[in-house]
Amino acid sequence: MVESTLHERTGEEVTTVNATQGLAAPVAIDVPRSWKTPIVLGVLALIWLICFGIFGDARTVAFGWSDTSDAIVLPDFVVNSKTFCLTIGILMLAIAVVATWLASQRRKVPMWLIIPFGVLLVWSLVGWVGAGGRVPVEFLLTGALALSTPVVFGALSGVIGERVGVVNIAIEGQLLIGAFAAAVTGSITGSLTLGIIAAMIGGALVSLVLAAFSIVYLVDQVIVGVVLNALAIGITNFLYASVLNDNSAEYNFPGTLPFLPIPFLSDIPVIGGVLFNQRITTYAMFVLVPLVYVVLFKTKWGLRIRAVGEHPLAADTVGINVKRTRFWTVTVAGMIAGLGGGALTIGSVGAFVREMSAGQGYIALAAVILGRWNPWLAACAALLFGFSRNFRIWAGQAGSTIPSDLIAMTPYLVTLIAVAGLVGHARGPAAAGRPYIKQ
Amino acid sequence: MSNPENTGLLVPLDEEIPAPSRSNELMREILGGGVVRTLLALVVGFVVGAILIIATNEDVLASAGYFFSRPSDLLTAAWNAVSTGYGALFRGSIYDTTATTFAEGIRPLTETLRLASPLIAAGLGIALSFRVGLFNIGGGGQLLVGAAFAGFVSFQWHLPWGIHLIVAIIFGILGAALWGAIVGFLKARTGANEVIVTIMLNYIAVSLVSFLMRTPILQAPDASGNPKTPAPDATAQLPLLLGDGFALHLGFVLVVAATVLYWWLMERSTIGYRFRAVGLNANAAKTAGINVGRIYILAMAASAAFVGLAGVNQALGRNTGFTPTIDSGIGFDAITVALLGGSTAGGVFLAGLLFGAMKAGSPAMQVESISPEVLGVVQGVIVLFIAAPPLIRAIFRLPKPATNSLIKQWWRARFTRGQVKK
């Protein structure tokens, strides 16, 4: 992939290389300008500006920050929807201009520019749909967080797996088994703590099978992943139909984890309700995303994991046991995905429902690649999916004129554009998907 | 992808070992070969299924309470549960032994063929993508788009008998192929990962087709806001093959033709040769002058075209309208069918038949109050073990396959044109 490394290398990097080689003057190397990102951003900004700004809805929209029952009540932010969308559209256009300038300087458009662009894009849409009504901001964000929790856990599992060189398509299966184990164990023992532990063990078991087949028996990782998903669906469907369905009070009535408001912090308007009045699973997510980042990129263990995923032969040469590292890392990743499964049942609705993961494992997979194998960005991508799902629910209640089918389509269309236009030739860990055979 | 042995990963047989006799070698080859492995994987799958049936059967659990006083009760109950379940599966999918006439008895087999048809067609599509080194998880979306195109022609246009059906079939296949070509195009032009693109296109297809099914384009007049299409015109329905008593329709014949076409395309045609070259090593293919990007687009379009035939089969093989759930998991099952069939024409056909039989037998199992969901586990276990030849060899202590295949030599000597290198 010589071309893509050239694309991604910035001008400065090239000069540094030359300087260290002791050349008198840095030789200008013609790195091709990549216009893809500015074009995508520019086109999106224009569409948004024209559709929602210029041809926007002239009614006012009220952004509600707090309920009357909250400790601190903030007044609603009332604004003309058209003005709001025009302002946002111009801001988006400004970002696109900055991106164009960066591209003309042969520099990469950084993530800290793309993420605000996405946030603006979403709020413009919210402001347009909510015209003539009230937008419950706290409800939108809380629901988004709740809906994205399993996906974030799945995406973390995927990031860890791919960083160590194992492509984990089986996230879907891990979520499903985790959800099942949490609900059943929680019901039988009456302890939700045991339910959480069971969810993690369930996810780890799926990972163990994945690891055994792909690392020990050298079966193609993608194939094992797909088959494990089918198997997880088969097993949970069978047990649901033959055991849970007839005795749901006994085996499938776990109850849900309680909300744990953090004193004082939970009283902060908007942020308090969203971030500090959640279930233990969501708090675990807040802890795990930075933790996985730190472990992967700041510790010796993480360095070893990434070495095994990028160049197993080199890792082996310096004495790292490649197979063992992969085996245990994938197992830990499975525990995280299993916890995400637990968030689906006891962290949300309680009872287990047939095939309740409903493709969220695959969404997590998309979040991994969209987030360029980085825990923070993958979590952001997962949040985007959660937000758009909740947005659809709210837009349906708000009586939006856009057909709900088209709203449902938006996040996937955005992902498609992002994958094709912004990520493109993103390179994951070099050895992901390849078994390592010691010579 | 299907056969890790061919990738040269495993250490070849030691040259120093004296050559075994010819008959021993043949025996070794049969035992180490794919057919025996497949059969053993089937055995393992059904044994696991039997264990699940026994473990959840109420009679068995009741008799397990006094196992040590009367162990025979437990064994009888277990035997009854398994034989009832698998007996029902046989009666529901192959031959109904309780039937009075032969026509009645053979009806389950025709049901198996009918239900296997879309699985085989979609399985061929996924298999094609595997051979090109792509992974098409987008079967569900492609099937739905194919069904929507075929459905549109079947109830919006009113053409003469014969022409109508042909036009509807062609539209369905082309519609799906276009949908698949998007994936190939994005991969070729932007390097987007086809796994994500196909997953996203699945969701987009469902939303888009649901939306259209709420508009006059695809909605039935009496659907009142629900996404549902009108029934296809009688001229556009796939005609029944065996008369009114049987549901088997022309779709099966189309699928047999598609299987032959797939074989010719992949094994004999120039384009198939390029597909396989890209699948084995895209860089080498590029060096050899193959336009890899174009092959990706063509391959995804071809892959989706086969899946589209499954969609046509679903949309036109009925006399009622359909909803966005017409895929009913075929898109995903097709992946396991392709894996089980080793991505070859014959293998996919047989694998599709097996899965079709399981679908056909499910209602009969339900009647005997054995959860047919157990078949999902059986399918998963079978494919898992098929995908792991070293594991199944370790369980049954089979020999490693011979590196120089006698059967292949014999076959090639008779059925290949031109010189065969020894």
Image (cartoon, rainbow, N blue to C red):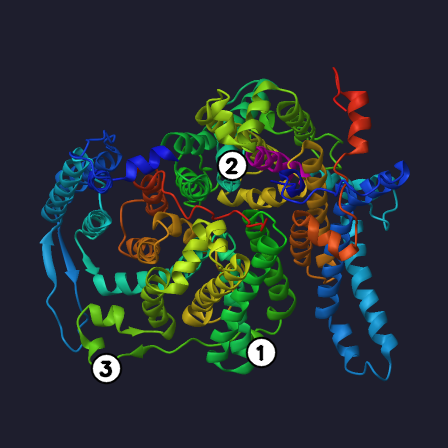
Query: As rendered, which of B386 and A292 lies closer to the eye?
Result: A292
- Which residue has dot 3 on it? A263
Mark 2 surroundings within 10 Å by alpha-carbon count, few (fewer than 14), some (14 through 19), many (20 or more): many
**Labels 1, 3: front one:** 3
- Which residue has dot 2 on it? B134
Instruction: Point out the tag, 1 or 3, that comes first from the N-terminus.
Output: 1
Is residue B298 visible in this depiction of the protein? no
Say yes or no: labels 1 and 3 on the same chain.
yes
Is residue B76 visible in this depiction of the protein? yes
Region of the chain picked out in magenta, as a range = B115-131
Q: Quadrant of residue A140?
A: bottom left
Mark 3 surroundings within 10 Å by alpha-carbon count, few (fewer than 14), some (14 through 19), many (20 or more): few
Residue at the image point whose x is 55% and y is 73% from the top: A184
Quarter of the picture containing the C terminus of chain B is top right
Disc on res. A250: 1
Q: Chain ID for label 2? A: B
> Magenta segment: does it hold B380?
no
CA–CA distance in space, label 1 to label 3: 35 Å
Find residue B383 and report its horizontal and vertical position in percent.
66, 49
Residues at marks 3 and 2 touching, judged by CB atoms closer than 8 Å: no
Mark 3 belongs to which amino acid? Answer: Pro
Residue at the image point whose x is 76% and y is 42% from the top: B401
Q: Chain ID for label 3? A: A
CA–CA distance in space, label 1 to label 2: 45 Å
Mark 2 belongs to which amino acid? Answer: Leu
Look at the numbered disc 1 and give the secondary structure of its residue.
helix
| Residue sitting farthest toward the top | B418
- What is the chief secondary structure element of the magenta stretch? helix
